[in-house]
Amino acid sequence: MSFGGIEAGGTHWNCAIGAGGAQPARVATFPTTTPAETIARAVEFFAAEPELEALGVGLFGPVEVRRDSPRWGTILTTPKPGWEGTDVAGALAAALKVPIALDTDVNAAALGEWRHGAARGLETFVYVTVGTGIGGGVFANGRPVHGLLHPEVGHMMVPHDRTRDPFAGSCPFHGDCLEGLASGTAMRARWGRPGEEVTDPEAWELEAEYLALGLANVVLVLAAERIVLGGGVGRAPGLIERVRARLPEVLAGYVDADPLRDMATYLVPPALGPHSGVIGALELARSCRRAENRTI
Ligand code: ZN
C-alpha cells in the first residue's frame, strides 16, 4: 500500500511515492516540458509502483480545483506555452486508474507545512513561494482556500515607485503586479542576469521592499497567524532578514497582535525546505483515500 504525490510545478515536476509522513520512499524530478512528455514521465514513474492506492497532485495554475466542475484538474489561462487547456488530472487518471486528489502546487506546499512543517497547529496561515513566479497557498480556519478558483497571491497589486524602479514589470497580464516586480523572472529582466548572480545590496533592498508590501497585504487581508516564505528567490541569503526588518515598518503598528512582535517566528522559511510541495501532494493522496468518493 502506498501513495503517490506530484508537485507539478511550471518549471519542474517532483514525483514521490510514500506511505505518508515527511519522508517519501522514492522521489524523481524532471523538467516541465510539453504536456504530453511531462505527463508521460510521471505515468512511467508511478506505473512501476504495483500497490499505488491514490495520487495527490499539486498543480501549477491557474487551475480548476472545484471537484464538481467539468474542467476539474485542467490548466486555465497560463502563459506557459502548450499547457493552457490541458486536462492534467484526466490524463493521469486515465493512465494510472487510481483515485486522484488535486489542489494548486502552493496549496499542496501549504498542506505539507501544515501537517509536517512550519505551520503545524495553525488555523490561518499563508505559504508564499518566490521563484520563477510568485504564488501563495492560503489556509483559513484549517482548510485550504479555493473560492472562485484559488487565491492568486502573486498577482496582487503593490505600490510601484517608478522613480526608484523604472522597470515596467514582467507579468504578461498585469505588468507591475507583485510577480511582475519581484519574481525571479522580474529580477532577471530588470538586472539582466539571474537573481543568484545579483549581488548589489540595493537590488535586494528593492526585492525586500516589494515582498514586504505584498506580505503586508497578506497580513491585512487574511489575518495570517504566520507566513512561510519559500522558493528559490525566497531562500536567497539575507532576503528573509531584510523582509522581516521592513514588514513591521510597512504595517506601522496598526495590527496589534502578539505573533507580529517577533518577526523571526512570524515570517519563517519552510521547515520542509524545497520538499513542502511533494510532501503536501502525498498528504492530498492520503486525504483522497480517506474520502473514498473522489474516484473519477
Ligand atoms: Zn500579474
Image (cartoon, grey):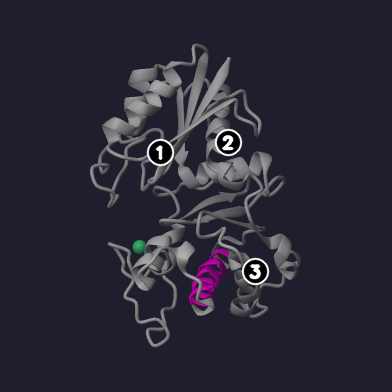
Give the farthest residue toward the bottom: 163
Look at the image and give the residue range highlighted in magenta.
203-218
- Which numbered marker is on residue 241? 3
Earlier-in-chain disc, 1 versus 2? 1
Q: Which one is in front in this view, the residue at disc 1 or the one at disc 2?
A: 2
User: What's the distance in space between the residues labelled 1 and 2, CA to CA?
Assistant: 22 Å
Q: Quadrant of ligand 1?
A: bottom left
Q: Amino acid at mark 2?
A: Ile
Instruction: Classify 227 as above or below 214.
Output: above
State the image quarter where residue 208 is shown.
bottom right
For label 2, the crowd category at 10 Å Cα-Cα, with few meaning under 14, some 14 to 19 and many 20 or more, is many
For label 1, the crowd category at 10 Å Cα-Cα, with few meaning under 14, some 14 to 19 and many 20 or more, is some
Q: Which one is in front in this view, the residue at disc 1 or the one at disc 3?
A: 3
For label 3, the crowd category at 10 Å Cα-Cα, with few meaning under 14, some 14 to 19 and many 20 or more, is some
Tag 2 residue? 279
State the image quarter where residue 284 is shown.
top right
Left or right, residue 228 beside residue 147: right
Q: Are marks 1 and 2 in contact (CB under 8 Å)?
A: no
- Which numbered marker is on residue 66? 1
Q: Are marks 1 and 3 in contact (CB under 8 Å)?
A: no
Q: Is mark 1 within 8 Å of ligand 1?
A: no
Q: Which one is in front in this view, the residue at disc 2 or the one at disc 3?
A: 3
Residue shown at 27% from the left, 31% from the top: 36
